[in-house]
Amino acid sequence: MKSALVIALLSLATIGLPAQANEGLEAGTLVICDTQKQIERLGELFEGKPDAAISAVNVEANDPTACGMADVAYVSGKPLGTVRSKAHAFHVVPIIVVAVNTPRGLQPVNSTVYFTLVKVQEHSV
């Protein structure tokens, strides 16, 4: 696992994400997409049911695996922007996935960049 973290941090330098922007290795189940454009579209369509938005983006992308739910270990980059649906706001965040959770626990994978959404709490002023 240590080597996967080193690879992830090296990958961050390679793609231009500043290492100091990362909070370290995180793990959890999240919505991920292959491209920034796909995750932005998913955020626009999200109305509380991720499966519906995921399906819609996958149909638009003509790729049944463009977006999905994944239980992974990852390193986050800095937010790239904000996207809104009718009722929600999200930061668009690049992540580097370094492991996938399987029945045998977290298994290292080749580091891959994906994109996810992080919910933004907005307050009325």
Image (cartoon, rainbow, N blue to C red):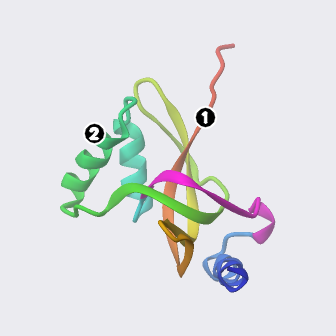
**Quarter of the figure with the N terminus:** bottom right
Q: Amino acid at mark 1?
A: Val
In magenta stretch: residue 27: yes
Residue 48 in the image, given as x and y percentages of width and height: 40, 30
The span picked out in magenta is: 19-32
Q: Spatial distance from mark 2 to mark 1, Cα to Cα?
A: 20 Å
- Which residue is pictured at 41% across the width and 31% down the height? 85
Say above or below: 29 vs 106. above
Mark 1, residue position: 120
In what element is the residue under mark 1?
loop
Say above or below: 41 vs 115. above
Say above or below: 9 vs 65. below
Quarter of the view holding residue 14: bottom right
Q: Is residue 115 left or right of residue 10?
A: left
Q: Amino acid at mark 2?
A: Ala
Question: Which of 99 and 18 lies nearest the eye of the viewer?
Answer: 99
Of the numbered discs 2 and 1, the one sitting upstream in the chain is 2
- Which residue is pictured at 61% across the width and 77% down the height? 15
Mark 2, residue position: 52
Q: Is residue 50 left or right of residue 58?
A: right
In what element is the residue under mark 2?
helix
**Quarter of the figure with the C terminus:** top right
Q: Is residue 1 left or right of residue 42?
A: right
- Which residue is pictured at 81% across the width and 66% down the height? 20
